[in-house]
Amino acid sequence: MSTDQASTDQSSTSRLAEAPAKPPPPSRPTDGRPRVRLGARGRQQERVFWLSVTPWLLGFLGLTLYPLGYALWLSLTDSDGISPNTHFIGLDNYKELLSDPVTRDTLVRTGIFVAAVVPTGIIAGLALAVLINRPIRGRGIYRTLLYLPAVFPPVGAAMAFKMVFDRDTGAANGILGFLGGSPVTWLADPYARYVLLMLTLWGCGNAMIISLAGLQDMPKELLEAARIDGANSWQTFRRIILPLLSPVIFFQVITGVIGALQSIMPMLLAANPSPAAVTSVPQGNYLYMINVFAQYLANGRFGYASALLWVLFAVILVVTALIFRLSSGAVFYNFEPETNK
Amino acid sequence: MILARRTGLYLVLIALVALFVSPFGWLVVTAFKDNSEMAAYPVHWLPEKWQFGNFSKALTFFNYLGYARNSLIIATIYSVLITLSSAWAGFGFARMAARGKRLVFGVLLSTMMMPAMITLIPTYIIFARLGMIDTYWPWVLWGLAGAPYLIFLFRQFFAHMPRELEEAAIVDGCGYGRIFWRIFLPQSWPVLATSMLLSFTWVWGDYIAPSLLLSTDHTTLAVAVATQYVNESNQAPINNLMAAGSVLYILPVLLLFFVLQRGFVTGVSTSGLK
């Protein structure tokens, strides 16, 4: 992803840099930095640029960077967020969380959740995209209806699933009863995790839309050439479509992992998401993030929760770095940046 | 043979659509049942008597409209501010040449990767110190700061605008501020709509920020719907009213989506690709 974005950025920057002066000779390497001396226009552009990013930069400093540093400091204290006498306790929070079996359990559970949800979501989205990319009448209607769950507000989605999987009044048990089975307590262990999985996969319309855009951007000549060479549809998919789609898939893996690690859906699926309910989320759905909320909301342990969050942040950094590393050979950036057209 | 395959394709599609729509369908059906039908066994697939009254009960069970108004105010303030500030930043990134731009852009993109949760606890403490708990100021500040995702969306769009637009205006003695406001912004209504819709639904759907920063009386509909349909005596959720309230809560987002879905889908897909 980063390579792609960098190249897009570069092309637009260099195009703009040429504006004030005469266009530079084509042989000259452009790396996106203005090489020409800045004229009055150039200085004005610099000023306008900094003016334009000032609100965001101030927000970044005040609402992101400062809280981030604050979170680091908090993680070294026994803060409860309210009482004034907060004590610096060094790495005690980290020592505690490392020795707490709950941390390991929730981390493993969350890992399994991410490993189940991210690939299946992407594959399901891709399959839907391939299906809907065929010449069908009324494509827009199918696309819209399949995408619909992805725009549901999380609370609304959780409510719908709560109703479907309610033990006494839900449709899931209704179908089970119709088939002659006995009712199941879906929202408790061991079934709760499958409900959570289904709820998350229900929103795979987003992945579908992104993959669909990738499919429709595909150079027609290549697909045509493959067809003439006698490739069957699986070969075409495997050898041409999939490699060309790899940056899109890569983007989805990264954002999907970051998103899934932070899922609070188990909380919303609980009967009534309050501090007490956070701790009563079924074991199978007691993910890492739920433990953070339990420590924070129910126990008022701001310092400890901050330490947990920093560990999560470190895990995310390591995982994304690993994904970047592992995918470096598998992701192809063949697309001409759009800005060059 | 071909006909059979085509029919098969449509059957698969229709089955999938039915599967995807069914949870919402069940929510709607549940919203129309009365208490006795809720308790019926085996489950009644469709209510025998449709209880339209459930919806008015859902609206009066607690101060539903008051919470809806809170949601509406916060979401409107936030979406207008964030759209303007993101557009302005996107304009700078797309059209201005400046030293340090690539570095700033790199920082912007990397913040997209950061988990939002990590700043949650300190943000709560900071806003508490500033006396902003239980006010809408946090949403004003967040709105003014813009969102990397939307900035990126606007940057992509503005980068495609013809250079002549700008040149002509400069010859006429227009400053960049006016160029942005009078030329670029009016031209970019598809992105403006996408940005407004996205940011509006973020706030409409957000559960965490309002539940932490606002008191139970001043919170948003998302929090109220999730927490307040509970029977006082046995703490059990009242499912049919909860379903009715949820349907009413989801409806505005669905309507917005249907009205703007073409632009919305394009916006999501272009940003996802780059």
Image (cartoon, rainbow, N blue to C red):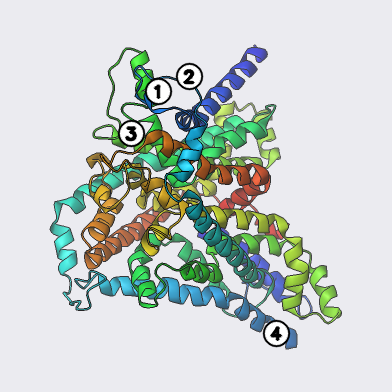
Query: Quick one: quadrant of the C terminus of chain B?
Result: bottom right
Q: Amino acid at mark 1?
A: Glu
Q: Which residue is mark 4?
A: A44
Above or below, A24 against A240 in this view is below
Query: Regarding mark 1 in the picture, which secondary structure is present there?
Result: helix
Q: Which residue is mark 1?
A: B37
Q: Answer yes or no: are tags 3 and 2 on the same subunit.
A: no
Q: Which residue is mark 2?
A: B48
- When asked about the image quadrant of residue A15, the answer is bottom right
Q: Which residue is mark 3?
A: A194
Q: Name the chain under label 1.
A: B
Structural crowding at the residue carrying mark 3, measured as other residues with C-alpha within 10 Å and reported as few (<14), some (14–19) or many (≥20): some
Dot 3 or dot 4: first in sequence order is 4
Camera-nearest residue between A274 and A278? A274
Dot 2 or dot 1: first in sequence order is 1
- Residue at the image point whose x is 32% and y is 48% from the top: A273
Query: Regarding mark 2 in the picture, which secondary structure is present there?
Result: loop
Q: Amino acid at mark 4?
A: Gln
Q: CA distance from mark 3 to mark 4?
A: 58 Å
* Mark whose residue sits in front, 1 or 3: 1
Q: Amino acid at mark 3?
A: Tyr
Q: Name the chain under label 3.
A: A
Q: Position of residue A132 (x, y in %)?
A: 61, 31
Q: Is residue A18 left or right of residue A198?
A: right
Tag 1 and tag 4, C-beta contact below 8 Å? no
Q: Is residue A134 left or right of residue B210?
A: right
Tag 2 and tag 1, C-beta contact below 8 Å? yes
Structural crowding at the residue carrying mark 4, measured as other residues with C-alpha within 10 Å and reported as few (<14), some (14–19) or many (≥20): some
Q: Answer yes or no: are tags 4 and 2 on the same subunit.
A: no
Q: Name the chain under label 4.
A: A
Q: Amino acid at mark 2?
A: Glu
